[in-house]
Every structure is written in structure tokens, then in C-alpha cells.
Amino acid sequence: MFEFSYLDISGSMGLVASGALTLNVILGMFLSTNLKTTTYWKKLPPIVKKYPIIKYHNFTAYTACCFIVLHLLFLFLHKEPGFSIDILLTPLAVPKQPNIVLLGLISFYGLIIVLISSQKIIRKQLGFRTWKNIHLIAYATALLFLIHGLLMDPLLKDRPTDWLDAEKFFSEGLLIVFLVAVFIRIRFQFNQKKQSN
């Protein structure tokens, strides 16, 4: 019979958050390219086109945030020395991998900024251009969280990264998908500018 510790559950919550963040950024890329006006969209089957991308984009953002909070909560319940709620303000004071912990917290704070600035009332006050610039933090947020997941020792023992571990392999896959999506997005933007000139 398997026994799960709070640390195992925390790691699982982190993996779910990583997947949700990656999907969120990809859906955001679809929205930012006006996908529905492209020939690619017109070639898709009707069953795919009926799904409201914006709703899934919002859902994955809130899902990622919830799972990050659970990731932290179960980490605090594990009662590892130095891993208490204090790390939210002093991440470099943790005894294990402080720089990697810092990456995760910067990512979490970035996601909160993106979520808060995306609320209708705040978005309206900011104006589109300012909101859009703040929203670009989402790319860095996802990248930092994926790097955090890749480099953090799941047992908090400062062991070197086992690149063939199943959890790390999942994170590696997400990172590759993320980087390919960013490349495609940049290439799409470049081609759009080229066509408009």
C-alpha cells in the first residue's frame, strides 16, 4: 500500500499547476493572434471551433493559481525545517535550494499580478496597452515555474536533478511544449508584420 506524505502531495499539486500554466499561456497565445481570423482556424473541424477559448484561458489561470496555493499549503503542512509561511516574504532564508524557491515565488507573485490586473474593473482603468504589457508577465511566470519544477529536489534534500525521473520528464515535456509554442507565436507575429509591410 502506498503512503503519501504532504511533500508528495505538494509536488503533485505543483505538477498540476505547471500543466495548467502551460496550457494557459498557449490558450493566451491563440487569443493574442486573433486565431479566428486566420486560415488555420477556418480549416479546423466545427467541434473544435465551438469551444470558447477565453473561458478555458481564464479557467486554467485560476486553476493554476489554486494549485500553486495548494502546493504551498501542503509544503507548509510537511513541516520541513525552514519551510513555513515565512518563505512567502523571505524565500532566500530557506535552508534548501533558496534560489530555486525564489523562482517559484516570483512566478506565483507574477501570476497574481496578471490575475488582478485582468479583473474587468482594473483592466478598464489601466487601458488596453498597459494591461497588455502587464499581461506579458504570464510568459515569464510560466517559464520560471517550469524551471522551478525542473530544478527543485522533490524530497528537499539538495540532490542533483534526475532528468529521467517521471516528474522531471513531465516538466521537461511541458518546457519543450512551452518553448515551441513561444517560437511559433514569435514566428506568427513576424510573418504578420511582414505581410502588413
Image (cartoon, helix red, strand yellow):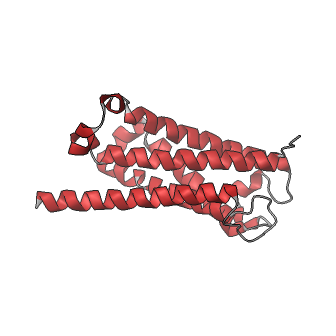
Q: Residue 140: in sight, yes or no?
A: no
Q: x, y percentage for residue 35?
A: 28, 43
Q: Which quarter of the picture shows residue 183?
A: bottom left
Above or below, comparing residue 172 to residue 112 in the picture: below
Looking at the rendering, in which quadrant would you find the N terminus? top right
Above or below, comparing residue 72 to residue 104 in the picture: above
Q: Residue at x 76, y 51 (%)?
A: 85
Q: x, y percentage for residue 149?
A: 64, 58
Which one is nearer the viewer's eye here, 142 or 111?
A: 142
Q: In the rendered picture of this protein, how many numbered marks are placed on residues?
A: 0
Q: x, y percentage for residue 59?
A: 50, 35
Would residue 115 appear left or right of 135 to someone viewing this image?
A: right
Q: Residue at x 34, y 38 (%)?
A: 124
Q: Which quarter of the picture shows residue 44?
A: top left
Q: x, y percentage for residue 65?
A: 58, 43
Which one is nearer the viewer's eye here, 192 or 108?
A: 192
